Image (spheres, rainbow, N blue to C red):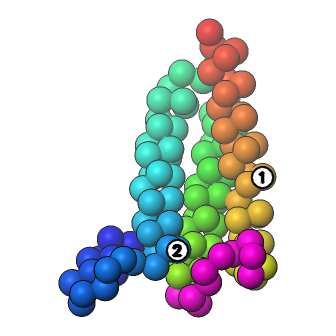
Amino acid sequence: MGYPIVAIRVKGAPAVPKYLMSAHTSTLLHGAVLLGLVWAAWLSSLGMSWEEVAAWLLVVSSALVAVKDTLNWLTGVQDEFGEKAKSALLGALAALPETVGIGIFVVGVIQAL
């Protein structure tokens, strides 16, 4: 998402659209979380199948958030909550798998301690 940001700024825009920056930031943040799964899986005492389920839940959640923010940017949404944007449903759908996936890893790591 950094390329569109650069392209917009090079054209002289004083700022980038809110949801383009959000899509850029959230994908970077989720990328770090997904890389952190390596350590969580290594520390976890749960079986590989639980860790795989947790990892896939986090991957799906990350993808949903990225798609939500990208759609908000492409459709010109200014405030997804105030406008009740249809893409907000993707954010709601992302919350549950993210919470469950992280919860599984937290349980596995705590059990290993």
Across and down, in percent, residue 98 comes to 68, 49
Whether residue 79 is in magenta: the answer is: yes
Residue at left 71%, top 60%?
94
Residue drawn at x 47%, y 37% is: 36
Asked whether residue 54 appears in the rendered view, the answer is: yes
Under tag 1, what secondary structure?
Answer: helix
Image quarter of the N terminus: bottom left
Quarter occupied by residue 66: bottom right
Ranked by sequence position, the earlier of labels 1 and 2 is: 2
Q: Does the stretch in magenta take in 87?
A: no
Q: Is residue 15 left or right of residue 97?
A: left
In the picture, measured across the screen, residue 60 lies left or right of residue 81, that is left
Looking at numbered disc 2 in the image, what kind of residue is underneath it?
A: Tyr
Range of residues picked out in magenta: 74-83
Q: Could you say which is closer to the camera, residue 13 or residue 31? A: 13
Q: Count residues near mark 2 (Cα–Cα under 10 Å), then give few for <14, some for 14-19, many for 20+.
A: many
> Which mark, by number, is residue 96?
1
Residue type at the position of mark 1: Leu
Q: Residue furthest top?
A: 113
Q: Helix, strand, or loop for circle 2? A: helix
Q: Is residue 21 above or below residue 12?
A: above
